[in-house]
Image: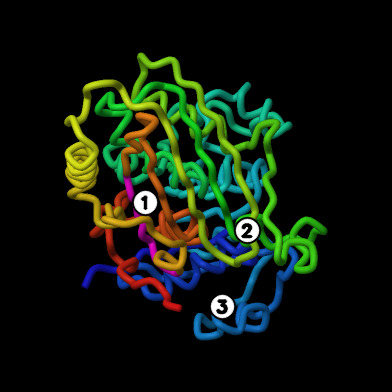
């Protein structure tokens, strides 16, 4: 068996970092060699997260050169992530960044949405956008891969086949619901149990940070279209999961006549588009978030509304797995020439 890749997780103390550790522990070609987390530095990882006790690691404040790692995952917040990755990239290491720091191509747009200047704008042009199903060639070549946001992953996978095939008009609505873990592990009134339980709330109507990412990647699929994207996220009182419902007017006469015929044709188009993608499933009925909990799958249900002539696509995924850590491991697999599904074949949890 080939020597295992020694990996580091920067900021293992966040939800994405914990999920990375859980998934990589089962990866047959990866060895977790170092984990960082400033707030818990010096503590055994198992004392902070008892479920990770078997890893036998100690959390450090920073990544040391003596750790001897081959690959780095960063689960740090934006700006801090790019700053921490710069020394690693200068050493020639390859990395997947789970923050937003390398997702947007335009440094000025990044500053507009994240209110900070980008620490390394010269790297943006060469970073690969890590939506694995759509960008494998770029991911294979890249030194740093920008792991997509959880909402964009659900929305882009839902709309890519229809946009690519010219089935829809460019006026798109993405209505998304997320579990509370999507807000991260930081304490705040907005994610306090008593504030979020038994209620649903929309937020980010003035412009959510994932909106420019969704628009950027959809434009790459249909560069001639004058896209208009409305994105409204909602907070749902559950721990994990994203459900996005995406709407767009259908281009007239692009699908067969009659509701049943159009539905069959649409489903066949989606199945064909993702036929070689192991983690996208096109299903015959609207999915539930529970169907993807704990797994790296994105489940799609495309439908035609014959009364309004609209496309409707329901998209489900686990925001911490396919929406973060699982997709990061999937990207590492592609970057290093491993089987894409390696370490990620675990089934979802039920109930």
Which of the pair 249/94 is nearer the observer?
A: 249
Q: Secondary structure at mark 1?
A: helix
Stretch in magenta: 294-302
The residue located at (67%, 45%) in the rendering is 202
For label 3, the residue is 57
- Alpha carbon separation for disc pair 3 and 2: 34 Å
**Residue 179 rendering spot, x and y as whole percentages:** 59, 60
The answer to whether mark 2 and mark 1 are in CB contact below 8 A is: no
Magenta span includes 300: yes
The residue located at (32%, 57%) in the rendering is 285
Who comes first in sequence, dot 2 or dot 1?
Answer: 2
For label 1, the residue is 331
- Alpha carbon separation for disc pair 3 and 1: 24 Å
Visual colour scheme: rainbow
- Alpha carbon separation for disc pair 2 and 1: 28 Å
Q: Is residue 64 above or below residue 146?
A: below
| Camera sees residue 69 | no
| Camera sees residue 58 | yes
For label 2, the residue is 236
**Residue 345 rendering spot, x and y as whole percentages:** 30, 69
Q: Secondary structure at mark 3?
A: loop
191 displayed left or right of 71: right
Which of the pair 109/120 is nearer the observer?
A: 109
**Residue 297 rendering spot, x and y as whole percentages:** 36, 59
Say which quadrant the C terminus sits in: bottom left
218 displayed left or right of 339: right
């Amino acid at each position: 068996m080939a020597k295992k890749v020694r990996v580091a997780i920067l900021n293992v103390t966040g939800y994405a970092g914990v999920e990375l550790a859980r998934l990589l522990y089962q990866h047959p070609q990866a060895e977790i060699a170092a984990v960082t987390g400033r707030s818990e530095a010096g503590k055994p990882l198992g004392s902070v997260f008892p479920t990770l006790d078997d890893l036998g690691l100690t959390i450090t404040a920073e990544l040391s050169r003596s750790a001897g790692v081959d690959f780095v995952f960063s689960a740090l917040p934006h700006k801090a992530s790019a700053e921490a990755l710069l020394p690693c990239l200068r050493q020639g290491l390859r990395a997947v960044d789970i923050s937003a720091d390398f997702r947007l191509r335009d440094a000025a747009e990044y500053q507009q949405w994240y209110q900070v200047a980008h620490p390394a704008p010269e790297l943006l042009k060469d970073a690969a956008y890590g939506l694995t199903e759509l960008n494998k060639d770029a991911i294979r070549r890249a030194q740093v891969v920008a792991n997509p946001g959880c909402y964009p992953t659900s929305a882009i996978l839902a709309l890519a086949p229809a946009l690519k095939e010219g089935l829809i008009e460019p006026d798109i609505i993405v209505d998304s619901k997320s579990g509370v873990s999507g807000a991260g592990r930081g304490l705040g009134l907005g994610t306090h149990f008593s504030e979020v339980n038994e209620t649903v709330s929309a937020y980010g109507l003035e412009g959510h940070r994932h909106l420019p990412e969704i628009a950027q990647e959809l434009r790459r699929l249909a560069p001639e279209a004058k896209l208009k994207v409305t994105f409204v996220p909602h907070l749902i009182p559950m721990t994990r999961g994203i459900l996005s419902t995406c709407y767009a007017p259908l281009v007239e006469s692009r699908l067969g006549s009659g509701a049943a015929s159009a539905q069959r044709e649409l489903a066949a188009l989606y199945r064909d588009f993702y036929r070689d993608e192991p983690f996208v499933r096109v299903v015959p009925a609207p999915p539930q978030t529970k169907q993807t909990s704990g797994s790296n799958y994105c489940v799609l249900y495309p439908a035609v509304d014959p009364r309004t002539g609209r496309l409707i696509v329901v998209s489900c995924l686990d925001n911490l797995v396919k929406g973060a850590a699982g997709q990061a491991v999937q990207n590492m697999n592609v970057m290093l020439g491993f089987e894409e599904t390696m370490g990620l074949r675990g089934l979802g949890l039920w109930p």
